[in-house]
């Protein structure tokens, strides 16, 4: 089962609901929208989708810039998976670090392959850094 989330490029949320989850977790590298969505779902609230909503998105000017962005998304998602239990999914397992989060599109182009590899690298990098901290503390 895929856990849905709202994308903050065009999101509306009641102030009371925003305050109930203490707003965005500003300590996350990226993926604050996923974190707040999952906290809402875990609290019994719902999220919705409006296909008619308009979004103005800035596309990265270079492949390198896009890969860096995706790498940071990977780090952010690893942080979310480590901190927030996915509603209805239980605790995060190591294999979950490699699974995409609701992202459509396969590996139909070299750019798509690079993009997903950058996300995976970010997730693994953050996960391994977290593991070294745990091992180092023992």
Image (cartoon, grey):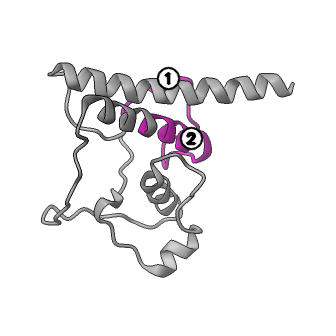
Q: Is residue 15 magenta?
A: no
Q: Nearer the viewer, residue 15 or 111?
A: 111
The residue at which mark 2 appears reads as 79
Q: Is residue 84 left or right of residue 17?
A: right
The N terminus lies in quadrant: top left
Compare residues 50 and 131 and report the one nearer the observer: 131
Q: Which mark is residue 95?
A: 1
**Circle number at residue 67:** none
Q: Residue at x 32, y 66 (%)?
A: 11
Looking at the picture, how far across and down is residue 3, in whole percent? 39, 46
The segment highlighted magenta reads 73-100
Image height check: is 36 above or below 70? below
In the displayed image of the protein, which residue is found farthest to the front? 61
Q: For this view, does 115 lie left or right of residue 78?
A: left
How far apart marks 2 and 1 lie (CA) works out to 14 Å
Q: Few, some or many C-alpha atoms within 10 Å of disc 1 (few <14, some 14-19, many ≥20)?
A: few
On screen, residue 29 versus residue 50, left or right, reads right
- Looking at the image, is 11 positioned above or below residue 19? above
Q: Quadrant of residue 121?
A: top left
């Amino acid at each position: 089962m895929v856990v849905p989330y709202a994308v903050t490029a065009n999101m509306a949320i009641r102030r009371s609901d925003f305050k109930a989850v203490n707003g965005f977790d500003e300590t996350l590298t990226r993926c604050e929208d996923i974190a707040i969505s999952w906290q809402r779902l875990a609290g019994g609230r719902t999220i919705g989708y409006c296909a008619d909503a308009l979004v103005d998105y800035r596309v990265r000017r270079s492949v390198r810039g896009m890969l860096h962005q995706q790498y940071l998304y990977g780090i952010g998602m690893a942080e979310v998976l480590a901190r927030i239990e996915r509603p209805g999914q239980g605790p995060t397992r190591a294999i979950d670090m490699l699974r995409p989060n609701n992202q459509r599109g396969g590996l139909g182009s070299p750019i798509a392959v690079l993009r997903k590899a950058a996300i995976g690298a970010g997730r693994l990098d953050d996960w391994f850094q977290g593991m070294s901290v745990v091992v180092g503390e023992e």
